[in-house]
Image: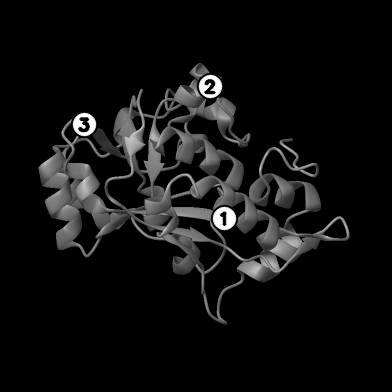
Amino acid sequence: MRLDNASIHEFLVANDITHLHHANSLATSITFFRAQGLLSRGFVESQNLFQTRQLSDDDDKNNDVWNDIFFDSRDLHGHFPRQNLYGPILFKFNIDLLLKEDLQIYITKSNPMFWDEKTKPEDKYFLDMDDVRDNWNKYELQRKMITVRFQDAPIDFEHLEKIIIDDPHVIIYGKTELLHEATRALNAELNKYPELKKLVELRNCGGNCFCKTNYLNQYNASKLAKFFLPNTHPHFNNS
């Protein structure tokens, strides 16, 4: 089920997919910056580094994807339009990342959180390039996650083009303005990495996006703190 790197790169570019997108919390993103690359959740755990908890953690371990790194082929924040569900920091990579031959590339047909012991291999992943070419359009965009399997080292930032941060327009606990705290922590960290700092931009999603409404009405203060604050902040919560 591993796909040939050059072949899947060619197929995706032919289908107007030119970037890979990974969303995460601010606190986990800081861990990535310090490692100088994206990390699988299994690697973070094995190295005793910090990451925010996710609801899918137990499922990821049970389904043998704990050591994988996931990308979306589109920025789902702009596609739906709503916030990215895994966090407000988006890493946008050029798809040439896939040409690194040491990366084992798979593509899911559904989110692993919905797998169980009865899920067949052919229902988890595209089996080969023929399967990709014949059946690509049968699956919804968000189900087709480009996956780097068994990744036990950072995926470096060579092909990183943008780091995009959401502005939720929300204040929690009376005076903690989320964007201010997030950008302050981000800038403090990226002062050590000026080339990365140049890639940071504030998301401008226009008037047709529901992210701000969703951040205000669907997320409680604890979840917002987990997503937008560094783990050193007094209001940070990793529950």
Q: Is residue 117 visible?
A: no
- From the image, tell me which residue sits under label 1: 88
Q: Are marks 3 and 2 in contact (CB under 8 Å)?
A: no
Crowding at mark 2 (Cα within 10 Å: few <14, some 14-19, many 20+): some
Residue drawn at 55 percent across, 48 percent down: 86
Quadrant the N terminus occupies: top left
| Quarter-of-image position of residue 237 | top right
Q: Amino acid at mark 1?
A: Pro
Q: CA distance from mark 1 to mark 2?
A: 22 Å
Dot 3: within a 10 Å radius of its alpha carbon, few (fewer than 14), some, or many (20 or more) residues? Answer: some
Q: Earlier in the sequence, mark 1 or mark 3?
A: 3
Amino acid tagged 2: Glu
Which quadrant of the figure contains the C terminus? top right
| Residue, disc 3 | 2
**Is 92 located above or below residue 123 in the figure?**
below
Looking at marks 3 and 2 on the same chain, the residue that comes earlier in the sequence is marked by 3
Q: Secondary structure at mark 1?
A: loop
Residue at left offset 79%, top offset 63% = 171
* Residues at marks 1 and 3 touching, judged by CB atoms closer than 8 Å: no
